[in-house]
Amino acid sequence: MSGMEVLYLDVWGNSCLQAPRKSYLKLHAISQKFPVVSREWTRLRHQMLAGQSEISFPFVEVAVPLHISKETIGYLLLSACRDPEIPEDASRLFWTELAKNGVHLSWVEWKSAIEELPVCGEKARKAWQRSLRMHAKSAMREVERLHNPLPQTERLPPMILQACDVIQTLHHEPLRLQQVAKICGVSAEHLSRVFHQSTGLRFREYLAEIRIRNACERLQHSRDPISLISEKVGFSTLSRFNHTFKTHTDMTPSAYRKNPPPSHLDMKRTS
């Protein structure tokens, strides 16, 4: 929608991913063809991420940091746009510097590449930055949830601690929210609302995670057939177990048994 490309940068500002994967911008083609342009572009990007004000390129980019537990792990960036406040002289000056460095590029070609970029003034850039920040926060919350999907029990209310204990004890049964709520002495609606507010997970999500954890342990430490493991951890059908297992681990149960990721259970274990 912005006309710009979305990039994920690592913590040092190096490009790791971009969408779309193949750039059709003339500016990127020039950058790939001439290393001088690429180096200067990288230098400008590092200045921007470091909060420095020096601008030597006739275009700008919009970036926001990605945080996990207040630690910066990378950046989300929109690249690139043309600031209407930057005069054409700046573009011509940079083109002249390129020529001095042996870049044989006509002024018409360079000017066309710059003019192709979407126009994005300061007000629009701030709006895109707010939008990027919102998407970045949402993405990082999901990453943190996937890496540590179970809640830290010491922070949970007593009722939710009891519910979690019931789920962990009876997960192999055809467990229902109403059954757990009855044991906890509250209504199903109340337990569902408080459980989600306290843990960030819905009842069925927590139950599925407990079942898959148990299945992973059995796949690694037993010779039981997968169909029997599916039944032992509480799944009513093998197809449902296979689908849920792949959703949680990105692997089929048989592939997991043959080559289990060493960090899978550690990543999902609560502290």
Image (spheres, grey):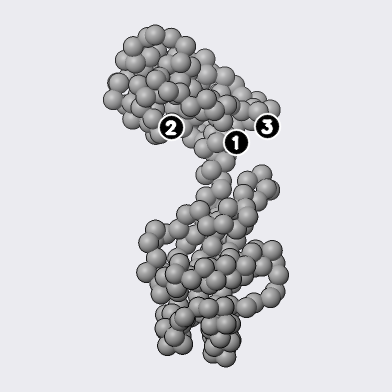
What residue would you read off at disc 3? 155
Q: Within the image, what quadrant is residue 19 found in?
A: bottom left
C-alpha distance separating marks 3 and 2: 24 Å
Q: Say whether disc 1 or disc 2 marks the residue closer to the N-terminus.
A: 1
Q: Which mark is residue 248?
A: 2
Q: Residue at x 68, y 48 (%)?
A: 70
Q: Are marks 3 and 2 in contact (CB under 8 Å)?
A: no
Residue 68 at x, y percent in the picture? 63, 46
Q: Residues within 10 Å of mark 1 (few under 14, many from 20)?
A: some
- Specify the amino acid type for callout 2: His
- Label 1 secondary element: helix
- Label 2 secondary element: helix
- Specify the amino acid type for callout 1: Ser
Closer mark to the observer between disc 3 and disc 2: 2
C-alpha distance separating marks 3 and 1: 8 Å
C-alpha distance separating marks 1 and 2: 21 Å
229 left or right of 130? Answer: left
Say whether residue 149 is visible: yes
Q: Residue at x 57, y 78 (%)?
A: 101
Q: Residues within 10 Å of mark 3 (few under 14, many from 20)?
A: few
65 left or right of 252? Answer: right
Foreground: 261 or 242? 261
